[in-house]
Amino acid sequence: MKLKSIVAASIVALTTLSSHAATTTDWGTHDLLESSLALSAGGLVFDTYAFTLSAASTVASSITSIGTLAPATYSLWNADNTPTAFSWNFGGAPTVHTVNLAAGSYYYSVFANATGAAAYSINSAATVTAVPEPETYALLLAGLGVIGFVAKRRKSV
């Protein structure tokens, strides 16, 4: 009976030692490109990457992994811990995921199970969504006015 207790305690201790410590990385205001690398000797991976967007932006992200991470997912969350509708699986070669986000604070949550030594790299690129300037609308209205004038003139001739 004592041997079973020692074996059980050893398994629990080894599992605890082999698990990846959860990390939180704060990128601050999202630059054009943000990137981070994480390593694991094995066990559960649960990392977060926080960032802030100062304006509405198009954000593209991907994760490249080496080693066995399965299952492996990453999700995009609002800073107040409410989920967005965006969650993806990853493994091996990267797949780029693009979303449009309003100004605000967000974070990526990465969850995986490493069955041995493994690593992953998360990359995120943000570009501010273009907003037309008032001159653009003025030019559009002027063009429509000219087209209307020409159409009316042709109709009367």
Image: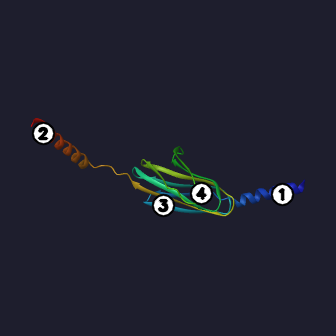
Q: CA distance from mark 3 to mark 4?
A: 20 Å
Query: Which part of the image, by quadrant, shows the C terminus?
Result: top left
Residue 151 at x, y = what percent?
A: 16, 39
Rate crowding at label 1 as few (under 14), some (14 to 19) or many (20 or more) other CA atoms within 10 Å. Answer: few
Mark 3 lies on residue: 34
Where residue 38 sits, quadrant-wise, is bottom right
Mark 4 lies on residue: 91
Q: Residue furthest left?
A: 157
N-terminal-most mark, 2 or 4:
4
N-terminal-most mark, 3 or 4:
3
Q: Nearer the viewer, mark 4 or mark 1?
A: 4
Q: Residue furthest top?
A: 156
Q: Nearer the viewer, mark 1 or mark 2?
A: 2
N-terminal-most mark, 4 or 1:
1
Q: Are marks 4 and 1 in contact (CB under 8 Å)?
A: no
Kind of element beneath mark 1? helix
Q: Nearer the viewer, mark 2 or mark 3?
A: 2
Q: CA distance from mark 3 to mark 1?
A: 44 Å
Residue 97 at x, y = what percent?
A: 49, 53
Residue 4 at x, y = what percent?
A: 87, 55
Q: Nearer the viewer, mark 2 or mark 4?
A: 2
Q: Nearer the viewer, mark 3 or mark 4?
A: 4
The amino acid beneath tag 3 is: Glu
Picture disc at residue 7: 1
Q: Residue furthest right?
A: 1
The amino acid beneath tag 1 is: Val
